[in-house]
Image (cartoon, rainbow, N blue to C red):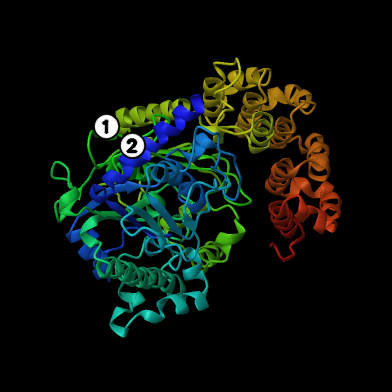
Amino acid sequence: MKRLVGLLIFALFVSSANSRDKTRPNILWLSAEDIGPHFGCYGDPHAITPNLDKLASEGILYTHAFTTAGVCAPCRSGIITGMYQTTIGSQHMRGQTTLPESIQPFTTYLRSANYYCSNNAKEDYQFETPENAWDDSSKNGHWRNRPDKSQPFFSVFNFTGCHESGIADTEKYKKVTKVLAQDQRQDPNKLTTFPPYYPDTARAREDWKRNYELITAMDAWAGDLIRQLKEDGLYENTIIFFWSDHGVGLPRAKRWLYDSGTHIPLIVRIPESFRVGGQGTPSTRLDSLVSSIDFGPTVLNLAGLNVPEILQGQPFLGKNLPPARNYVYGARDRMDERYDIIRMVRDKRFKYIRNYEPLKTFYQYINTAEKGVTMQELRNGHIAGTLPAEAEFFFSPTKPVEELYDTNADPHELRNLAEDPNFRETLIRLRQAHLDWVKRTRDTGLIAEPILVDREKKIGHRYGILRQGNDDTLTKRIAETAIAASSGPDALEKLTTALDDQDEAVRYWGAIGIGNIGMPASSAAKRLAKTLKDPSAAVRIAAARALGKIDQAEAALPTLVNELENGRQWERLHAAIVLDEMDDHALPVIEDMRKALAYRDDLYARGKYVVRVMNRALNQLEGTNRVVD
C-alpha cells in the first residue's frame, strides 16, 4: 500500500512538472578551466572576448565570485554537490571519496522534476558519479539530443583548451588557438597586466600571452554555443551561466588561495520573461559575494525547486533568497604528491589565510607544476639570484602562520598586514570567522589522510566521520589542536597533552605541532619517543618528524623506513615526505630508500606519488637527476 501511495505521489509530481515545462527556463552552463576574469567586460585592457562581453552586456556580471579551491577536481566536487569539498572529503587532489545517500549531485533533483540533463563532458568529481546524475554525460552531450523538444533542459559544456596544459604544452596551445585571426594575437611585451610575482623574462611573458590567447579561443567556443541556442529558437527561453572552475593555470595562482587562484569570472544572462524583482537587468554589475558551491542551489531555485536543507551552497538568483553572504571560504589540501593545509576566508575587501603547515615553503616541488615554463623560470631566477623581491618571497623556507590582505589597495596580495596593529580588529574578526567555519562545516581536511581513509572504510563515507559516534567534542579538539600546532612555543603544553588524546586525529596534530616548534620543544623528546609506538601509523610518522626537528633524527629514521617499506599508500607518502624534508639527516638510510625504489612496480601499484617524492629526495641527497615521474 505504501509503495502504491508513493508511486501515485511521484506520478502527480511528474504530471505537475510536465504541466509547468513550458513556463520553466532552460538553463545552460558554459564552463571553462584555469582562467581568471581577464575579459573586456571586467575591464582588462588586453582581453579580446567579444562574445562574453556581449553576454555580460545583456545580463549580470559578478565582480566577487570565488571558488572553494585553486584547483579543478576539489572545486568540481563542490560545484556538483553544493557542498564544501572539505565537508564531503574530496579535498585532496586526485583522491576518491564516497557520497552518503543524503548528498547527491544537484542534477538528480532536476531530473526528478523532468529536466533533461546533459554534460559535455568533464566530470572529475573525485567520487563515482551516481547513475541518475545525468541523462547523458559524454562528448556528445547536448540539449539537442533530448527526445522531447518541449522538455526543459539543463546542459553543461566545458572548455578544456585553456587548462594549464594549454599554456605548458606548445602543441596544445597551437591547436587550441589556430582559430584566432592575426589581430586576435597578443604581443607579450605589451601586456601591462603581467604579475609582479613572476620573473619578467621572455619565456614567462610568453606564458602570460598564451593565457590571453587561450581565453580568446574559449570566447569563440562560447560564442558558437550561444549561436546554436539562437538557431534553435531557445535564446529567450534559456538562462545562461558562464564561469571558470578556478583562477589562472600558472604558479602562485593555480593550487593557491590568493585571488589569482580563486577569483573567477561569473556572468549570468536571464531572459526578460524569467526575471524576478529586477534580477537580470542588462549591464548589471554586482559585488555580491558568490561561492562556487552556490551555483547548483541557484539553478535549483531558478528552476522552481526547493533547495535541500543539507546543502551548504545558497541561491543568489530567483525567488525567496537567503541573506547575502558575508564571507566566502577556500581550502588547499594535498596537491598530487605534496600536502600543504591552508584555509582562507574573504569578505568583499579583506582576505585572511591560515597556513597550518608554515614550516613548508610556498613552492614545494610538485611534479605537474614543475613542467610549466614559468615555474622553471622562477626556479632558475631563484638559483641565479635575479628574481624581483615579490617573486623571491615565495622561495622563503617557511610561510607566515597568518596572512591578511587588503585586496582593494593591494590586488596582487603582496603586503601581509597580519602584524600591522592598524588591522588588528580585522585580523581577529577573520581569524574567528575561519575557525567558526572549520568547526561548523566539520573540516575533514584537518584529519590526516591515512586516518581519513581508514575511517571512511568503517562507516562508508567521509561526510559522517565527524558527525557520527559519541565524541561530540572531536571536531572542536581537532580544530583547536591544529590551530595550536602553528601557534609557536607557547602552545607546547597543550600539544604535549594532545599526545594523550583518545583520538588519533588529535594526537597527530599534537606531534605535528611539537615538530613545528622545533628545538625549543626538545623537552618533549621522551614523550615523542614513546609516541613512536602509537597504534596509529600517521601519529608515529608525525612523531618521527618531530624528533627530526629537535635534532634527534637517528631515533626517528627506523620508524620512517618501516612505514616506507611496509605501510599503506598514504602512510608511505607521509613517510616519504618526511624523509625528503629531512635532507642530509636522511643520509644514514639512503640505502633503504634506494632499496624501496628498486621495487618500482610495487611502489607504483601502491602509489605513484611515493615514487615521485622518493626520487626527488634521492636526487637531492645524491646530486643526481633521476626522472621524477
Residue 42 is left or right of residue 6, and the answer is left
Inspect the image, locate mark 2, and give the three-letter code of the amino acid beneath it. Answer: Gln
Residue appearing at x 41%, y 35% in the figure: 10
- Residue located at (34% from left, 41% from top): 15
Disc 1 element: loop
Q: Quadrant of the C terminus?
A: bottom right
Does residue 576 lie above or below 431 as drawn?
Answer: below
Compared with 16, 609 (above or below) is: below
Task: Name the one closer to the observer, 479 or 198.
Answer: 479
Residue 627: image x %, image y %?
71, 66
Q: Horizontal and vertical percent for residue 488?
A: 54, 28
Q: Which mark is residue 60?
A: none
Residue on which disc 2 sits: 314
Q: Is residue 442 above or below residue 112?
A: above
**Label 1 sits on residue:** 322
Q: Quadrant of residue 43?
A: bottom left
